[in-house]
Amino acid sequence: MRPHIPHLDTETMDWTSPIPGLYSKILSVDPDNGARTAINRLVPSEGYSAPTVPHYHHSAEEILVLGGKLSFDSKTYLGARGYCFHPPETVHGFKSDVPEETTFLSRHSKKMCTHDVPEPAKREYYPLKGKTPDRMWAALPDATKDGWQDNVKILGEDSLGEGSKLMRLDGDTVNLSVPDVFYEEIFVLDGRLPAADGTTFVKGAYAFCPPGSTRPSFVSAKKALVYVNYGPV
Ligand SMILES: [Fe+2]
C-alpha cells in the first residue's frame, strides 16, 4: 500500500526530465507493487515524440489531461479534462499523437512496463487474451461533459469497487463518499477546499489516504472540481 500523503502541493514540485521533452513529477508510489501516480508533461518542441508502435501494459493505465491534447489513435483527441482508461493487457496506441505541449495526471495500477505490439490484430482497443476486461477501456475527449449525477461523474469502476470519479463540490457540506475501508486518492483540478486542520486544497493539491487513515476533513468547497480514485486494499 502507498504511504499516507495528507497533502501535497504538486504545483511547487520540481520536474524531473528522464529524456528530452518528457517531464515528470512522481506523486506517490506503492513500494510493494510499484503502482504510482504522476504528473507528466510532454513537450514536442523540445524533442518529445509520441510512440509509433502500439503497446500494452500489465498495469491498468489511467490518464487525465490537465492541459494541451493528445491522442492514442489520431482520431479521438483528449483535450483539457480529457480522460482515458486502458485495462491491463489491452492493446492501444495505434497512432499516437501529441501535437502540442501536454500535461496529464497518469496512474498505473502496478509497476509500469510497456510491451510493443508491432503487428496488432486490430487497429482499435482489444484485450490481448481475448477476455473482456473487468473494467472496460474508455477515451473521453472531455470527461466533464455529460454523465453527471448529483455532481458526481463515475469515470469507471471494477467489480471489486475500485474506480475513479470526478466530483463538483461547492458549499458547506463536503463528502467524497469513499468508504473508510477503501483507500482514497484526491487530485484537485480546480477551486478551493479548506480543511479543518487549516490546510486549504487548491488546484494541483494531492492526497493519498490508505484504508483507515485520517482523511482530509473539508469544511467547505468553492467551485471545486476534484478527481477521486478509490478502492479496497
Ligand atoms: Fe500506454
Image (cartoon, rainbow, N blue to C red):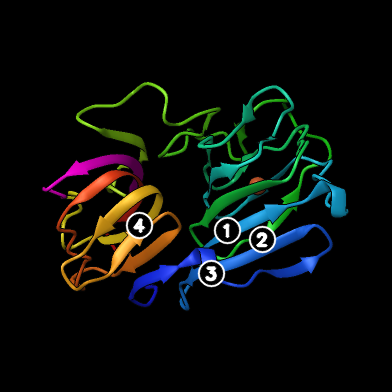
**In this rendering, which labeled residue sits more in front, label 4 or label 2?**
4
Q: Nearer the viewer, residue 167 or 181?
A: 167
Disc ID at residue 113:
2
Q: Which of marks 4 and 3 is nearer the N terminus?
A: 3
Judged left or right of residue 21, residue 189 is left
Judge whether 5 appears above or below 187 on screen: below
Q: Mark 4 points at which residue?
A: 186
Q: Identify which residue is drawn at 14% across, 58% down.
A: 219
Q: Identify which residue is drawn at 63% across, 57% down.
A: 40
Q: Mark 1 points at which residue?
A: 39
Q: Within 10 Å of the Cα at label 1, are there few (<14), some (14-19), or many (20+) other Cα atoms? A: many
Residue 181 inside the magenta-drawn segment:
no
Q: Distance between the residues labelled 4 and 3?
A: 17 Å
Q: Position of residue 49 (x, y in %)?
A: 84, 47
At label 4, the amino acid type is Ile
At label 2, the amino acid type is Cys
At label 3, the amino acid type is Thr
Q: Where is residue 199 in the image (x, y as percent from the top left)?
A: 27, 70
Q: Which of marks 1 and 4 is nearer the N terminus?
A: 1
Q: How far apart are marks 2 and 1 (CA)?
A: 17 Å
Labels 3 and 2 touching (C-beta < 8 A): no
Q: Earlier in the sequence, mark 1 or mark 3?
A: 3
Labels 4 and 2 touching (C-beta < 8 A): no
